Image (tube, grey):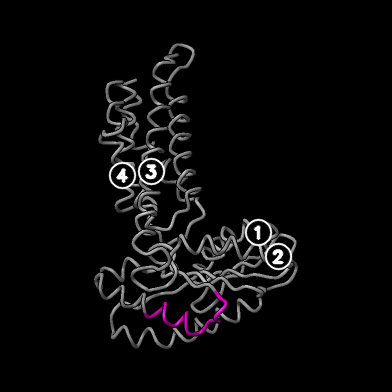
Amino acid sequence: MAALRDQARELLERWKEEIQRLPVPASIDLVTGEAGECLERLADAILAMVENGEEAASFQPGGEMYRLAGEMGKLRFRQGFSIEELVQEHVILRNEFWNLFHRSVDMKRVVDFHLEKKINASFDNLLQAAAAAYFYQGSKEIMENPLRDPVTGLYNQSYFHGRMMEELRRSVRYKHEITLVLCEVGNYHRLLEDRGKEGTEEALRHIASVISRLTRECDVIARLGEATFAALLPETGWRGGKVMAERLCRYLEKELPARAAGGECPELYWGLASFPDEVRLPEMLYTCAVEALRDARSLAWGEISVYRGEESGESP
């Protein structure tokens, strides 16, 4: 078991590699910063538990690792994770640990079912702590302001996802098009370093104001996580969505550098997806829009990334 204890670094790298495959905006610090520190501590603690079963106490409610998992849950909520993505992250943590464990331990000689049960219970506790903290953070924000993001005044992510489901059901029922446009501030963390919290929030408020002014009353505009904005466009196909995104992009491209006054200027990336034009299943609209947003990082400034279904033969 001691040999496995020395592989915390390998486990951490495997976790990071797999977690970065999650379909979330690229601006989110998935495995660096606060999240990276939490993952490193978890890797050390889990492998220490393999060596010494008494370490499992820290994974129990009230224990150090249990509290750490709760902080991760709150962090992922602030970053705009869905609960499904939070669960998927914990599935990765568990699966990659067992892959390493089974490769490192001769299972023909070492079959400690009591240890396996204890490890699985610890992973269950980590997910329980993260999910509980995630929902607590969400309910706290809803109680403080059930609809609005406190920084920009746009709809918050909790309200937005509910409205999106409602609009998608209406789209299916009446066979209408619907498009989701996502806008990401790609250099969000550099903005924080250059402008500080107040200056960055001022830039976010300006972007939010422009998006609100240049969209329709029926469109649903929201801030998702730290650096991502969303515009849900009912009865709009991908062409109309692209025209709207291009208009917003051109307007902000002129305004933002002037307001930066020589400092760090927000770098915006745009991605969109449409149902049923390209996205065949309504529940996949958000995931496909995120995929388009990630692809936008390889495009030139001002270009809009449009999700194209496999059967599509038309160029965006």
Residue 171 at what x, y percent from top left? 68, 66
Q: Three-letter amino acid code at disc 4?
A: Cys
**Can you tell which quarter of the image residue 185 is in?**
bottom left
The residue identified by callout 3 is 132
Please tell me whether mark 4 sits on a helix, a strand or a loop. Answer: helix
3D distance between C-alphas at marks 3 and 4: 17 Å
Disc ID at residue 276: 2
Q: Mark 4 points at which residue?
A: 38
State the count of labels: 4
Segment tinted magenta in the rendering: 206-219
Residue drawn 49% across and 12% down?
Answer: 108
- Which amino acid lies under the numbered mark 1 shown in the image of this protein? Pro
Write down the residue under mark 1.
282
110 and 120: which one is in front?
120
Number of other residues with Cα within 10 Å of mark 2, as a class: few under 14, some 14 to 19, many 20 or more: many
In the rendered structure, are the residues bearing label 4 and label 1 in contact, judged by CB atoms less than 8 Å apart? no
User: Are the residues tagged 2 and 1 within 8 Å (C-beta)?
Assistant: yes
Nearer to us: label 4 or label 2:
2
The disc, 3 or 1, on the residue closer to the chain's N-terminal end is: 3
Measured Cα–Cα span from mark 2 to mark 3: 35 Å
Query: Left or right of 260: which side holds 229?
Result: right
Distance from the alpha carbon under mark 4 to that under mark 1 = 35 Å
Q: x, y (%) of residue 261?
A: 28, 86
Residues at marks 3 and 4 touching, judged by CB atoms closer than 8 Å: no
